[in-house]
Amino acid sequence: MAEGEPIRVVVTGAAGQIAYSLISMIANGDVFGTKQPVILHLLDIPPAMGVLEGVCMEIDDLALPLVKGYVKTTDPEVAFKDVDAAFLVGAMPRREGMERKDLLSANVKIFKVQGEALNKYAKKDVKVLVVGNPANTNALICSFYAPSIPKENFTAMTRLDQNRAQSAIAKRLGLCVSNVKNVTIWGNHSSTQFPDVFNASVTSSDSSKSVYDSINDSQWLEGDFIKTIQTRGAAVIQARKMSSAMSAAKAAVDHMRDWWSGTASGSWVSMGVISDGSYGVPKDLIYSLPVSISNKQWKIVQGLKITDFAKNKLDLTAKELLEEKEEAMAVCNA
Ligand code: NAD
Ligand code: LMR
C-alpha cells in the first residue's frame, strides 16, 4: 500500500531503450520501496515525443498504484522542478568500434545544460545518477554547473560493471551471484576500469573465503577476467548491434536503491563519486570507488589492500579521467 507524500523522480532519455526498462522498475517500487509513491518526470527531445507518448500509455496500462502521476516534457525547467532523484540517461549511445569517450563532444553539453537546470530547479538534496556516457565525466560536468548542490550528490554508474564482475566470478565458481561480495570497480566506466577481486569474498551460510583463494587461478583473475569486464559493453554492442539496456536499467535500479536504502553491514558497492584523495586518486574526479551507505550518505571504504599491480591500474584509469576532464571543460567553454 502506498504511504505518504510522493517523491518526484526525473528520468531523462525517457523514450530510449534503457528508460523503457527502468521506468517500469521505478514505478513498481524496486528503487524507492514498495510503500513510496512517485511522480515521474519524463524528459526527452522533440523528435522523441511521439514515442514518449506511447511510453506514457504503457505507464497507464501498467496500472501500478505507486504512480501518482507523470509529466512528459522537452523543457528542463519542468523536468527538474523539485525533483528528489534524477536518472540522467538521455545521451547518444556508442556504436561498434567506438570507445565511450568518443561520445564526449556530442554528450557533454547535455550535462552542462542539465547541471544548470538541476541547480536552478531541483531540490538541494537531489540524488543524481548519471548513466549517459562517458558517465564519469558527464557527472563531473553536471556537478560543476550545479554549484548550489553538494558534489556528493552527483554519481556515475559503474554498478553494471560490478554486476558483470560478480556474475562472471559466480559463474566460474558455479555459485549463485548472491554468494559473491565486495567486488570493487575502480576508476572510469571505460576499458581502463579496474575490476578488483583482491578484496572480494565468496560467502555461504557458515563461511567466507576470498575470491582469490576460491578461484586459485591468478593468471585468469589478472588477465582474461579483467579484460572481459573492461570490454563487456563492446561485446554486447557487437552481438546486439545496440548497447546494453536491460542490464543497464537493472544496474541503475541497484545503484539508486542502495543509495536510498543503504548497504548491509560489512559490504560495499561501487559508485562513481567525487574523489577526495583516498587511495592516491587525484581529487575532484568522478572516480568509481568502494562505498558503504547509510542515511542516504555514501562513505568511501578505507583500508582496502592495494597491491602494486592494482596501484598501476588505479593510476592508469585516473590518467584517462584527467584527460577526459580537460577535454570536457574545453568543449563546455568553446
Ligand atoms: P537510446 O538512444 O535508446 O536513448 C537515448 C534517449 O536519450 C533517446 O530517446 C534520445 O532522444 C534521448 N536524448 C538525447 N538527447 C537528450 C537530451 N538532451 N535530453 C533528454 N533526452 C535526450 O540510448 P540508451 O541505450 O538508452 O543509452 C543512453 C545512454 O546510456 C548512452 O549514452 C549509453 O552509452 C549509456 N549507457 C551507460 C551505461 C553505464 O553503465 N553507465 C550502460 C548502458 C548505456
Ligand atoms: C555498457 O557498459 O554496456 C554501456 O556503457 C554501453 C557501452 O557503450 O558499452
Image (cartoon, rainbow, N blue to C red):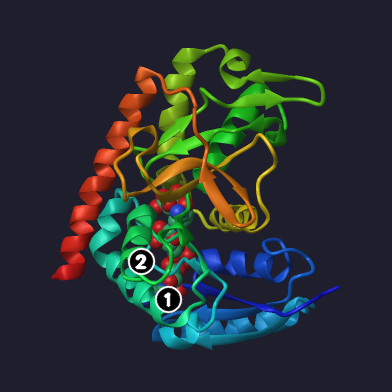
Residue 254, horizontal then vertical, whole percent:
62, 53
User: On the image, numbered disc 2 is attached to which residue?
Assistant: 142
Q: Would the CB of label 2 be found within 8 Å of ligand 1?
A: no
Vertical side of 66 occupied by 327: above or below = above
Which residue does the image show at 38% across and 60% down from the upper left? 139
Residue 30, horizontal then vertical, whole percent:
71, 61
Vertical side of 100 occupied by 11: above or below = below
**Residue 290 makes an appearance in the image:** yes
Q: Which mark is residue 118?
A: 1
The residue positioned farthest toward the left in the image shown: 334
* Horizontal relation, residue 172 to residue 36: left or right: left
Label 2, label 1: how far apart the Cα atoms are: 9 Å
The residue positioned farthest toward the right in the image shown: 1
Sequence-wise, which precedes: disc 2 or disc 1?
A: 1
Of the 4 image quadrants, the one containing the N terminus is: bottom right
Work out whether residue 235 or residue 255 is closer to the camera in this orientation and state it: 255
**Could you tell me the amino acid type at mark 1?**
Leu
Residue 264, horizontal then vertical, whole percent:
70, 42
Q: Would the CB of label 1 be found within 8 Å of ligand 1?
A: no
**Residue 242 makes an appearance in the image:** no
Of the 4 image quadrants, the one containing the C terminus is: bottom left
**Could you tell me the amino acid type at mark 2?**
Cys
**To which quarter of the image does residue 140 belong?**
bottom left
Query: Are the two marked residues, 2 and 1, in contact with CB atoms closer than 8 angstroms?
Result: yes
Which residue does the image show at 59% across and 58% down from the upper left? 256
